[in-house]
Image (spheres, coloured by chain):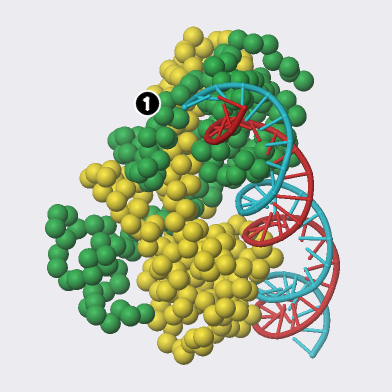
Chain colours: A yellow, B green, C red, D cyan
Amino acid sequence: MTDLNEPLTQDQKSPEAKLRGNGRPARKRASVPEAKLLEFAELLFFAYRDFTRDPDAILKDFGFGRAHHRVLHFVNRHSGLRVVDLLDILTITKQSLSRVLKQLIDQGYIVRQAGSSDRRERLLFPTGRGRALAERLAAPQLVRLASALKATGPGAEVTLRRFLEAMVNAEERPKVSSIMASSPVPLKEGGKEEEA
Amino acid sequence: MTDLNEPLTQDQKSPEAKLRGNGRPARKRASVPEAKLLEFAELLFFAYRDFTRDPDAILKDFGFGRAHHRVLHFVNRHSGLRVVDLLDILTITKQSLSRVLKQLIDQGYIVRQAGSSDRRERLLFPTGRGRALAERLAAPQLVRLASALKATGPGAEVTLRRFLEAMVNAEERPKVSSIMASSPVPLKEGGKEEEA
DNA sequence: GAAATAAGTCAACATGGCTGACATAACCGA
DNA sequence: TCGGTTATGTCAGCCATGTTGACTTATTTC
């Protein structure tokens, strides 16, 4: 539609060309052609589809779903985060979070404790049981990632990291960075846990 | 728990080391440390979360959901695929597919036509309306991908493509390749469409 | 002609999003 | 100290999209 001006064939058009809306060449470097970008979109879908497959199967045995995995993952990786942090990460409503979080707490995978500086806050920690399940769910994903990185060859890590960071909304990037920097190794939170 | 044997600090363990279960060095090259792999897992989550955000907002205006987007995307990109192909791609049941596909057909975004060699098959094609919506949904994703690739720098395309392909289940890779090779530019299916 | 295949349908159920309304406790500023 | 704001939690109901199981129809294949 409305591509009467461009004598380019379909698979040479680029998003920038469309946004420029004229026939002049790009200022710096030609962008990736649209057809190739669509292939990346598809590959991303297939990669993510299979990335979530293994943990989903394990979760079923526990009567949990993917939502539980996400919560448990972030609580395990970033022990002591607040409920509001989790809401921000997952971008869901507190009512949706509440449902799965409650189950994880009731079944002894996560504990809640009041913040010391602000006692309204509820800080979330994994129990030993929670850590064990989080690790079990992560295991197949880590194997997949490790072997994919290896298959990709040298430079894969740096390139991939840059790409994934750039895929995140610009306004979200500082938040994401600060989350990823926080307690990258689960804290020994010192307190005694109520193990089941 | 049960990590009494390994004197390694947490962020030096690797999936291979865990699978080897002994202290000897890896045969060829040290794999990416577990902590780094976990960061990739998180970044993948954040990237995919934001990747789907823009089209989701557009879909809402049409009373559609992400499931409709997936169906419309693949029908548009690979015109003439069969229902069974779609089931295989999406990895959902035909009852789930049926619900969204029916809506897309009823509302004039997709047409169905009997296969010529095997008349049991129903081949799926986008209408003009379907192509328009598919393109509108894809647009923000393509812009995001293009700018992320640009930000990543030279070599990003090759590396990313290899990585994403390696993330797909090994048994699925031939299927994925053949899907991606099929009608990468929407076919002009020649026939007249029933546009609304 | 029988079996297998491609597609479609009905019914019921589970998960995990959503909105809206409201309650409680704690903090914070005037 | 009081009143507003913030962090959290909860109830109720709705919607989208996944599931299983059973069954039908048309067509191809052996």
Answer above or below: position of A85 versus D8. above
What is the x, y in percent for residue A174? 48, 56
Q: Is residue A14 left or right of residue B124?
A: left
Answer above or below: position of B178 versus D5. above
> Within the image, what quadrant is residue C3 found in?
top right
| Residue drawn at the location 30% of the way across and 54% of the way down | A146
| Residue drawn at the location 60% of the way across and 79% of the way down | A106
Q: Nearer the viewer, residue B49 or C13?
A: C13
Q: Is residue B2 left or right of residue A196?
A: left
Q: Is residue B46 left or right of residue A63?
A: left
What is the x, y in percent for residue A162? 37, 46
What is the x, y in percent for residue B89? 51, 38
Residue occupied by mark 1: A29
Residue B108 can be seen, yes or no: yes
The C terminus of chain B lies in which quarter of the figure?
top right
The amino acid type, in three-letter code, at marker 1 is Arg
